[in-house]
Every structure is written in structure tokens, then in C-alpha cells.
Image (cartoon, rainbow, N blue to C red):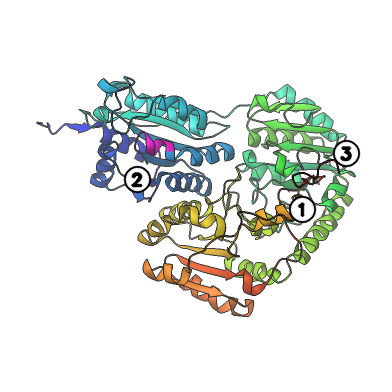
Amino acid sequence: MHNPSNTVTVGAVVAAFLEQCGVKAAFGVISIHNMPILDAFAQRGTVRFISARGEAGAGNMADAYARSTASLGVCITSTGPAAGNIAGSMVEALTAGAPVLHITGQIETPYLDKGMSYIHEAPDQLTMLKAVSKAALRVRSVETVLGTLKRAVQLALTAPTGPVSVEIPIDIQSALTTMPADLSPLPIERPVPSAAALDALAARLAAARRPMLWVGGGARHARAAIQRLQKLGFGVVTTTQGRGTVPEDDAGSLGAYNIQKPVEALYQTCDAMLVVGSRLRGNETLKYELKLPRPLYRIDADAAAEGRCYASEAFVCGDSALALEGLADRLEAARYKADPQLLVDLRAAHDQAVAALRDGLGPYAELVRQLQSAAGRNFNWVRDVTVSNSTWGNRELRVFEPSAGVHATGGGIGQGMPMAIGAAIGAAVTGSGRKTFCLAGDGGFILNLGELACMVQEKAPMVIVLMNDKSYGVIKNIQDAQYGGRQCYAELHTPDYDLLCKSIALPHARVRDLAELPARLGEALAAEGPFLLEIDMLSIGSFKTTFAGPPTNTVTQIPALGTAGK
């Protein structure tokens, strides 16, 4: 086909638009149904494309890139089975509110939705994508490509943020067109809170002597406003998504110690709590039975959050930073000051909670201490769902920036390692200087084992701390606690990671005694690319306190078959 010099493929338009959105890296798997876009990436040389080994991993990478850089994450997949493979990653991004643009190919327009069993076709794929995305759009012509992409990016980045999928049929991707003059993304509107609602909320808070702020992931951009309220004497506690919004060594913050008994007791001495940008999720509220202070007030960009999970006495719909700045203006003008004893009591509750956690770690308290020392202050802390994360990773290591903590919010195992790759690539392309630490368990780790090859190929600057007990440790603990000790299906055949790592040129060290840890951590930090630090839990021993699933106020025992009623 003749290609006049002033024409480009639609794939090139896609690439050029993403560049204008500030995208520095994208993730995915190349296929015949996305090749025009990736060919444009390669020719233009601006967006770094990371070749994942599977779409599930690529989606997790784009998600963590978005969270750790506070920017748009991008994932490119093929259609049909490939678009299906990313579904779990999209659910995670949706749960976490990560702004991800998922561009998927689609079969040629003349055959689309005809039920002709065309290769890579999935019946009603768009409906599937709508179920796992904030929104899912289809490009239907060359003329609508740019407008559709602009709208998708705007949707992804507008609070409440989330992943948006866009289908682009392959014949449209490869079609020739002229490069549009205006590639600029659409503005992102921040919902402005009502002045009257802020006046009313400020008046209520001015009557409180011991007010607490509960900070969720939707307030990660509101650090400056939160610090203004802290100066007025507000105490702070965060969710796992809100970690680092206030540095976790701040004396006025509980960090993410939000459900421990000393903290719940502290709540009962408070006379107001303001929940900002949080969904008050079940696993962080003891399945909604955590006794929070009353009155309870909420600020959220999502109007539908009002009354969800917990009833509230007042609700302000708006961007959390704008709302908190407005509250700070009003309370400062009123010369408000909270009871200084609140922060004294908060620190005591924090120290009690931390002491109990560290005591329960047994030998692993030393691991946590050494990791904190090695990590410093400028690092990414990415965690998979594993006993170690639930025991300590979600509260320790301490993080100091709101984009530094990334975890599998939706509870799916195996996503931590590809997430860490995305965070590490984000650090590399933005020049943040952050080393990425990944906490994983051997049970989940093997789900995305192929992404180790991607990690090595990309020289991702990261350290994997692999807690290896050759089993689904949390499943065994749950079976002990709730199923009368009847253990099944939790013992795992586990690779010899020394041999595996040698086969793919991945530096590796196995720690059988924590006395070896300082030297091994030194090796890991000295490596320019990735390093796998395997912690042999069978040699080191068990935690002093057993974690047996998400904490609740009650534990139900499941009787053995034939014993019910006896």
C-alpha cells in the first residue's frame, strides 16, 4: 500500500497520544491483534514497552506502575483469550482504584459480533470488560479513535479513579490517517465540595475535643491539607491504601494500625471521626464491626459512598484535598485547637499495638528490623497476599510517601511479583531512585513465575523477599483454627529456587539463619537489577502468633462431616 509521507497508522496516533499523556512505560504481550500500536511504540522510541509473559502479569504491572508513580498506567493486550487473561488484574485495579488504560485489540470490523468463530474472537467481549472495568469503550471508526481514547483516559483519572478498557479493531489500528493536530488529553475535573456543606461540617468538628482522621487511598494527594489539620491537634489513622499519606514515623499518626485492640479502645475515647477517601472495607473494619468513634463524618468524591458500610452523621461530596483545605481554612479562622492529650493517648495506643505485633513475630522481628534499615526512606513496598504480609507487611515496613505502598487489595494471591515489576519500572523511567522491595509467599509466587523472565530481561531494580514454607501457610492456619485441624490441599511441591534462578541468570540467595541476613541484604542491594532473597521459613521457624485469615470479632468452627448436632 502506498503511504504518503503525511500519513501514519492509527497505531501511531495511539502512541503519540499516550506520549502527550505523560506515559513513559507501557506493559503487555505482543500479538497480531495489537501489532500496529506496538510497532509504533518501537518506531517512535518514546514509550518503553515491557514485554510481559502473560496478560495477567502485564495488568498487574500497569496497575502498580500507576499507583507507585501517581500517574496513568497502560496495558496493551490482544483480543479474545488475551483480554480474558487480564480480567483478574482488572478486578484488582478496580478494587484499588488504580487509573489504568487497558487497550485491547479486536478482530476486523466486518467480522465483529457475527459469531463466525474468527481467531481471537470472544463473544460479547465488551460486556466482559465492562464487568471488570470502571468503563469499557469500543472504537468504531478511524475518525473516533482519538476522541474515544481521550474520554477513556479522562474516565480513568477522574475520581473515583479506576481501570478503563478500550477495544480497537485491528483493521482500524492499521488504517492510515493524518496525525491529529491536537493530541492533548482532556482536563480532569475535581469535584468541588459545597461551601455550605463545609461550613456545617466545620461547625460540627469545632465542637469536638478529640477528633480523629481516618485516611483512605482517595486522600493520598491530600497530605498538605491533612498536615494542617494535624497542627490543630487531629489524630490520624490510615488504611493500607492510605499508607504513607502521612509519614509513618509521624508522632501524630497511628499509621495503618487501624484495627488493633489498643487502637479500638482509643477510638472509644474520641468524640469525632472524619473518614476521608475510604471505602471502609470489610477486612479493615472487622467486617464492619470495628467500633469507630461517633459522630462519624465522611468526605468522598463518590456521592454513592454516603451511608455505605457505616452510617454517617454528615457527608461532604468532593475532592478530598479541596474539602480538607476548606475545613482547615475554617477551623484555623476559628482558632480551633483539639485537646493535646489526644496525641499523647494516640502514641501510647500506637506503641502498644506495635509492641504486640513485634512480639508475635518471633524470630521474624529481626527480619523486619533489618529490612527497614536496608530500605531507608525512599523505596517502594509491594506486597502479595501471604501470611507475612497479613502479619506485618501491611503495617511494617514503615513507608513515608503516599505512592510507596502497593498491595493486592482484592486479596488475589500471586499478583505481588508482577506488581513489583511495574513499580520498579516506574521508578526507573521517572528517575525517583526508589528501590522496590517485594514481599511474597511461595504459594502465590508460582502463579506468575514466568514473569521472572520479564523481570530479568528488563533489569528491574527490585528485591524479592520470598517467604518460603513450601505450603499455603494461611490456608493451613485457617484449617487449624476453623476446620478442626483437618488440613488438605495446602502442601505444595516447590521449585529449587537456586537452580531456577541460575537457569534465568537471576541473582539469588537463600537465608536459613537470620544471622546471615545482613550480608545477603547487602548483596541484594548491590545488585543493579533484580535479586531474589529466599527466606527458608522451615529452617528459621514459625511466627509466635498465628495468622488465620482476615481478623473478625468471631470465629466459626466448621464441624467434621457426620458430627453436626452431636
For mark 3, does the 10 Å Cα neighbourhood hold few (<14), some (14 to 19), or many (20 or more) residues?
Answer: some
* Residue occupying the point 44% across, 40% down: 86
Q: CA distance from mark 2 to mark 1?
A: 45 Å
Q: Is residue 130 magenta?
A: no
Tell me, yes or no, if residue 547 can be seen here. yes
Residue that carries the numbered disc 1 in the rendered image: 484
Q: Is residue 95 left or right of residue 478?
A: left
Give residue 179's position: percent from left, percent from top.
24, 30
Q: Which quadrant of the figure has residue 115?
A: top left
Q: Secondary structure at mark 1?
A: loop
Residue 328: horizontal and vertical position, in percent?
73, 37
Amino acid at dot 3: Asp
Task: Identify the residue position indicated by label 3 in the image.
Answer: 271
Q: Earlier in the sequence, mark 3 or mark 2?
A: 2
**Residue 188 in the image: x percent, y percent?**
50, 30
Kind of residue at badge 2 = Val
Residue most extreme to the left = 2
Q: Which residues are magenta?
A: 78-84
Instruction: Give the mark nearer the N terminus: 3 vs 1.
Output: 3
